[in-house]
Image: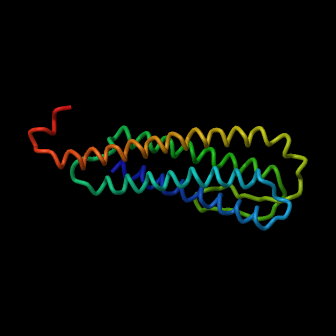
Amino acid sequence: MEALGAAGSVVGIAGFGLQIAGTLQTYAEASLEADDRIRDIANDISATASALQRLQAVIDHDEKLAEGRVFSVEGLKSVNKISSQCDVVFKRIVELLNKAGNPGEQLSNAERVKDLKLSTLDHLKWPWLEPKISRCRLELERLLIKLLLMLQISNLANQQTVYDEGLPSSCRNRY
């Protein structure tokens, strides 16, 4: 049951991240003055949210298996912790971007209280906010690496399960 709570959390956080990334991409494409910084932030958020979604797909598939589970309870707790950290960084980026501009395009999510408001005005605030945004981007990069590592480990575990199923039962527990 605890795994289902973690799964719902991951889905919501990944959706929130993809929603932010989509809004930022739309803003960057619509604004002639938008620079590569907005696109880079959107790409970082999108990559992290996509990795969360892929990991969620593995967890969903894992839940359906009777034997050979890929994720232990501790593994699911780790996934939940990383997704919670992603949520914190996503919210922080929205908060910083709100400080960078005037009310404009808005992003809202029923589960999230912060709205994203961007404008090409107020570029004077960027020099003070950019170091904080850069730190958030570095944190997203670190979290993305953790997510990709978990995906690789789950992939290896799945391959090991397939390999073990092909072995005679007398050879399976030799490790």
Give how far across and how far down residue 12 sits, in percent: 52, 57
Quadrant for the C terminus in the image: top left
Query: How far across and how far down the image is residue 155, in percent?
Result: 37, 47
* 152 or 31, nearer to the observer: 152
What residue do we see at 46% from left, 44% from top? 80
* Colouring scheme, one of rainbow, by chain, secondary structure, one colour: rainbow
Using the image, determine if residue 113 lies above or below residue 70: below
In this rendering, is residue 27 above or below 114?
below
Q: In the image, is 64 to the left or to the right of 13?
A: left
Residue at the image position 42 percent from the left and 44 percent from the top: 152
Residue for point 16% across, 32% down:
174
Q: Quadrant of residue 46?
A: bottom right
Left or right: 60 as drawn, with respect to 99? left
Residue closest to the far bottom: 30
Which residue is at 86% across, 41% downward?
127
Q: Is residue 17 left or right of residue 59?
A: right
Tell me how many marks there are. 0
